[in-house]
Image (cartoon, helix red, strand yellow):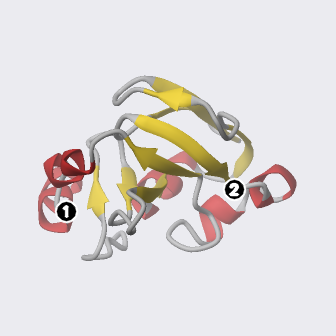
Amino acid sequence: MSEIPADLKYTAEHEWVSAPNDEGVVRVGITDFAQDALGDIVYVQMPEAGTAITGNDVVGEVESTKSVSDIYAPLSGEVVARNEDLDADPALLNSAPYAGGWLLEVKLSDVADFEGLLSAEDYQQQVG
């Protein structure tokens, strides 16, 4: 059974999004289910800070020993930070997908869009 923290929102593409902070910034990562399905992650490619992203567009990729998978923008906004730790240790996505293995921090174009993401219960139903 994959870990699905109740305080996060989720996408159908197996990404998690933290609640927006006071500046409308969220943190984005891949779910425990996704990292388990991918296997050992060996490389992560993500956009640089300052990049404008559009919800549902491909914004990067995760490469594992099994495959290469696209990373989709869960919401529209501007990348304000990328997890530089993943450059040296992409396996953080496997060992700590909800902590040290986050991918991006994004300042949302519209904070209200966050509410349109899947709840933990909805995501649990999707992954069975």
Amino acid identity at mark 2: Asn
Farthest residue, direction front = 23
Reading the image, the residue beneath label 1 is: 124
Q: Secondary structure at mark 2?
A: loop
**Left or right of 37 in this view: 13:** left
**Left or right of 47 in this view: 97:** left
Q: Nearer the viewer, residue 104 or 79?
A: 79
Rounded to the nearest angstrom, the CA distance separating label 2 from label 1 is 26 Å
Farthest residue, direction right = 88
Reading the image, the residue beneath label 2 is: 83
Q: Which mark is residue 22?
A: none
Q: Secondary structure at mark 1?
A: helix
Q: Nearer the viewer, residue 14 or 66?
A: 14
Residue 68 appears in view: no
Report x, y in % for residue 10.
28, 54
Report x, y in % for residue 94.
62, 63
Q: Nearer the viewer, residue 37 or 5?
A: 5
Mark toward the viewer: 2 or 1: 2
Crowd tier of the residue under label 2, counting other residues whose Cα lies within 10 Å: few below 14, some 14–19, many 20 or above: some
